[in-house]
Amino acid sequence: MIFRRKGLRLAPWYATLALFWAFSATFALAFFVAVFKIRPLHWSDLWVIALIGAMAWPPARFAWSLRLWIRRTRSYYLRVGEDGVEFHLPGAGEVQLAWREIQAVTSEKRWVTWNGPFPFAYRNNFYTIGTARGRFTFTSMDIPRPARAAHGIAAKAGTKIQKIAAAR
């Protein structure tokens, strides 16, 4: 089993990316039309034109950062094979684990806070593979269907998923 975001799984992300580039292009076009076509300009026109120009920046910035996130996410995968688990996850790089190395598979539902211009918190399931080499954690933001991946790993490793109570 291979868990990876590619093809149609990324279609909503690419649609969002295109939408925000379209927003930015619309504001930029409106700015240039206003600057070069509206005559005579009054002070109130200049204020509105400046605001329209400033509105082109936030969607472009969001689209640029989303593009980088999509590129990074496309490289993440988790492969459950006959010999063990092979994955590339955030902060772990390329890792191969034999089934005998896996000591535990845990599941924990945690609060995650996004610290952007409008911070908010949401709950997400974190699955962790425990080995002597370290702990490797993945979520639904890293690979599709992380619960199925964790159950497959636990079954092949001969262990059960341990649920960890959420810290408050």
Image (cartoon, helix red, strand yellow):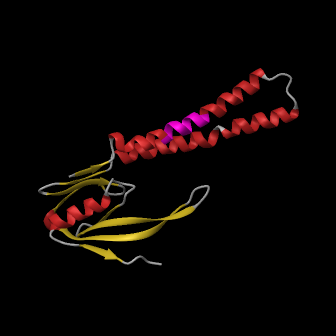
Q: Position of residue 40 (x, y in %)?
A: 86, 23
Query: Which of the two residues, 27 or 88, is positioned nearer the viewer here?
Result: 27
Q: Where is residue 9 in the image (x, y as percent from the top left)?
A: 36, 44
- Total marks drawn? 0
Asked which quadrant contains residue 45, the reply is: top right
Residue 94 appears in the figure = no
Check the image and report above or below for 81 versus 35: below
Q: Which residue is drawn at 61% across and 57% down?
A: 118
Asked which quadrant contains residue 152, the reply is: bottom left
Q: Residue at x 70, y 26 (%)?
A: 32
Check the image and report above or below for 123 versus 167: above
Q: What stretch is highlighted in magenta?
A: 16-24
Check the image and report above or below for 119 versus 14: below
Q: Horizontally, is 54 left or right of 97 in the view?
A: right
Assess whether residue 94 is covered by the magenta stretch: no
Asked which quadrant contains residue 47, the reply is: top right
Q: What kind of secondary structure does the magenta stretch mostly adopt?
A: helix
Q: Residue at x 57, y 34 (%)?
A: 22
Residue 77 appears in the figure = yes
Q: Horizontally, is 16 left or right of 148 in the view?
A: right
Q: Which residue is drawn at 69% across and 29% down?
A: 30
Check the image and report above or below for 78 versus 42: below
Query: Which of the two residues, 148 or 104, is positioned nearer the viewer here?
Result: 148
Q: Horizontally, is 8 left or right of 161 in the view?
A: right
